[in-house]
Image: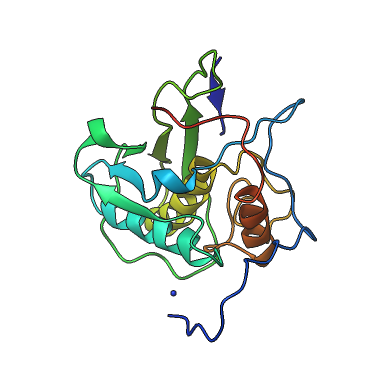
């Protein structure tokens, strides 16, 4: 079965983590019965390999940091590694211009896809998820750079387990992404996901 989709705190007192708000989320499963995947605590930090193309490693580390900063209790952390054979997630791109992103309105100048591998008889992924970013022709390098910043974070959201898209263009997980960072709804959804029992397990 193959699936394709597409900061410093002062702690004053200790208590049990609060259950995340379930208000205003857009879901994270795909199909019925729902498939739920997220990285368990014993697999953190999640290891991401970024193909050394342009500033792709920077974009991947930036995306990891953006998502990690949205969790209240460190439910997700990640790191970029230099060896694809030891990675939990592999990120590749055709080309990535190493220029300053265009600061203007969003332009659909790139695309991305996240592919999950088949699941075995024990509901365990048989390999790492793969993210691929593609540059679309007819745009300036600065427009492409801005698009890749948005799209890289969006696709990394899929690799975290956000398997559904949002229907709201103000959310980062709307396709294609029009905003550069997760919204409050994106963060709520990710946190609820990481407090929901998974039905699909990571690869060995």
Residue 72: image quadrant is bottom right
Residue at horizontal 61 percent and vertical 36 percent from the top? 198
Residue 35: image quadrant is top right
Residue at horizontal 39 percent and vertical 49 percent from the top? 44
Can residue 199 be seen at all in this image of the molecule?
yes
| Rendered position, 157 above or below 74 | above
Number of marks in the rendered image: 0
Image quadrant for the N terminus?
top right
Image position, residue 165 (x, y; %): 66, 43
Foreground of the two, 21 or 55: 21
Image position, residue 52 (x, y; %): 21, 44
Can residue 97 be seen at all in this image of the molecule?
no
| Rendered position, 185 above or below 82 | below
Residue at horizontal 49 percent and vertical 35 percent from the top? 113
Judged left or right of residue 28, residue 32 is right
Image position, residue 6 (x, y; %): 56, 34
Judged left or right of residue 27, residue 57 is left
Image position, residue 192 (x, y; %): 67, 53
């Amino acid at each position: 079965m193959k699936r394709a989709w597409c900061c410093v705190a002062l702690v004053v007192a200790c208590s049990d983590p609060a259950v995340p708000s379930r208000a205003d989320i857009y879901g994270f499963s795909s199909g019925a019965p729902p498939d739920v995947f997220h990285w368990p605590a014993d697999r953190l930090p999640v290891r991401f390999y970024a193909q050394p193309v342009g500033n792709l490693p920077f974009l991947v580390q930036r995306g990891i940091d953006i998502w990690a900063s949205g969790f209240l209790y460190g439910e997700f952390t990640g790191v970029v590694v230099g060896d694809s054979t030891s990675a939990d997630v592999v990120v590749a791109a055709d080309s990535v211009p190493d220029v300053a992103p265009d600061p203007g309105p969003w332009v659909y100048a790139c695309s991305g896809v996240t592919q999950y591998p088949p699941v075995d008889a024990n509901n365990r992924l048989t390999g790492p998820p793969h993210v691929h970013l593609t540059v679309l022709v007819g745009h300036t390098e600065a427009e492409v750079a801005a698009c890749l910043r948005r799209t890289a974070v969006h696709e990394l959201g899929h690799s975290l387990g956000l398997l559904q898209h949002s229907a709201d263009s103000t959310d980062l997980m709307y396709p294609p992404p029009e905003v550069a960072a997760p919204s409050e709804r994106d963060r709520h959804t990710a946190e609820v996901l990481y407090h929901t029992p998974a039905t699909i397990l990571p690869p060995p």
